[in-house]
Each structure stands twice: as C-alpha cells, then as structure tokens.
C-alpha cells in the first residue's frame, strides 16, 4: 500500500499543478494593475531611434497635454497587429503619441515604421530595456495615458483592439483631458 501511495503521489501533485495552471490561463493580463497609476512618469530620457526623422524622448515631452505612450518593437507580432489601431487612435483623438522602441536594432525599427507608417510624434530607443523596466512594462505592446501634469492615469497591457480602443483607451484619454 505504501509503494502504491508513493507511486501515485507525484502523479496527483502533477495533476493538481496542471489544474491550477489551466484555471489561470484565461486570466486577463489587463487585470494586473500598474503600481505607476496616479504616479508621475518615470524620468525617461531616450535618444531617438538612429536614422529616424523623429525626436527622442525627454521628460518635458510628457507634460503639458494628454499624451499616449506606446511601447513597441519590430519583432513583436502583436505590435504589428496593433499598429492600425494606433493610427485609428490618432484619427479619432488627435492626441500626442510617443513611442518607446524596446530592445530593437535601429534598422529593424526604421523598417517596421516605414512599412506600417509612423504615427509617433517622437520615438525613443530603449536599446537595453531599462526605460521599459522603469515604466513597469511586462511585455510589448503596452500603452499608457499620461495627463497634462505628467501623471500616468491608465495602462493597457497587450495589443489594443478597436473594441478596447473604444471601450477603454478613448474614455481614459477623455478622462485625462477633463482632469
């Protein structure tokens, strides 16, 4: 009896772990609340992506008006899918859009934006990922709404869809504009 119990116990533990992981697979990553909500933006200063005709990022760029900050990379498939939504965001709101290009070779970032269009007012090169860590980025893409005082008021984890744009992001921008 003891041998059977010792043989079955690891199997029961494995089944229990699989069940726990299976139940959490469908969790919405946007439920993870950023600790930076209602806090000032990190002191982000990033050079422009080399060879791109856009400015880099300096802290003062993130103040004075509502700004949307989008963290993206050319190697990120969801970023490619999200790109038309960013363009729709601009069309609907006219908000200032800043890009943080995470861990990307400059030539790849330039090719990505040349192919899909460059909706960003400025694009900073986060070559080592340090700025992304400061912003609390879990993975690309992620998008932040920053109010005119430089306070992060909203974070969207993962690629934006037209539905999330309409139901979450645009209302967050409007709320930030209203103060």
Image (tube, rainbow, N blue to C red):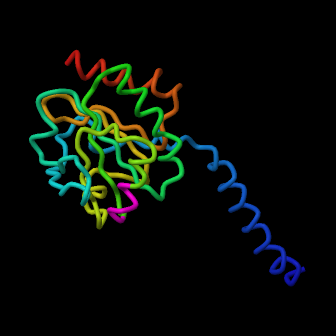
| Relative to 93, residue 50 above or below | below
Q: Position of residue 172 (x, y in %)?
A: 34, 24
Magenta segment includes 149: no
How far from the left and from the top, in percent, is residue 103? Answer: 35, 63
Residue at 11%, 29% in the rendered image: 64
Q: Is-magenta flag for residue 109?
A: yes
Image quadrant holding the N terminus, namely bottom right
In the displayed orientation, state which residue is furthest to the top: 178
**Residue 102 is drawn in which quadrant?**
bottom left
Q: At 58% across and 43% down in the image, what residue appears?
A: 27
Q: Main secondary structure of the magenta part?
A: helix
Seen in the picture, residue 46 relative to 9 is either above or below; the reply is above
Residue drawn at point x = 29 percent, y = 23 percent: 94
Q: What residue is at 48 percent from the left and 44 percent from the top?
A: 158
- Between 156 and 6, the one nearer to me in the picture: 156
Q: Which residues are magenta?
A: 105-110
Residue 82 position within the rendered picture, expressed as x and y whole percent measured from the top left: 48, 39
Quadrant for residue 116, please give it: top left
What count of labels does the image hold? Answer: 0
């Amino acid at each position: 009896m003891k041998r059977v119990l010792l043989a079955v116990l690891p199997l029961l533990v494995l089944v229990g772990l699989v069940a726990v992981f299976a139940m959490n697979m469908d969790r919405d990553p946007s439920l993870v609340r950023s600790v930076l909500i209602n806090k000032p933006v990190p002191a982000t200063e990033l050079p422009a992506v080399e060879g791109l005709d856009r400015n880099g990022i300096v802290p003062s760029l993130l103040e004075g008006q509502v700004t949307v900050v989008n963290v993206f990379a050319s190697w990120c498939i969801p970023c490619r899918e999200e790109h038309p939504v960013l363009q729709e965001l601009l069309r609907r709101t006219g908000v200032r859009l800043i890009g943080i290009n995470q861990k990307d070779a400059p030539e790849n970032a330039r090719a990505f934006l040349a192919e899909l269009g460059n909706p960003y007012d400025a694009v900073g090169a986060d070559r080592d990922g340090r700025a992304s860590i400061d912003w609390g980025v879990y993975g690309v893409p992620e998008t932040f709404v920053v109010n005119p005082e430089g306070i992060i008021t909203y974070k969207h984890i993962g690629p934006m869809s037209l539905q999330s744009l309409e139901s979450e992001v645009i209302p967050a921008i409007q709320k930030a504009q209203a103060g």
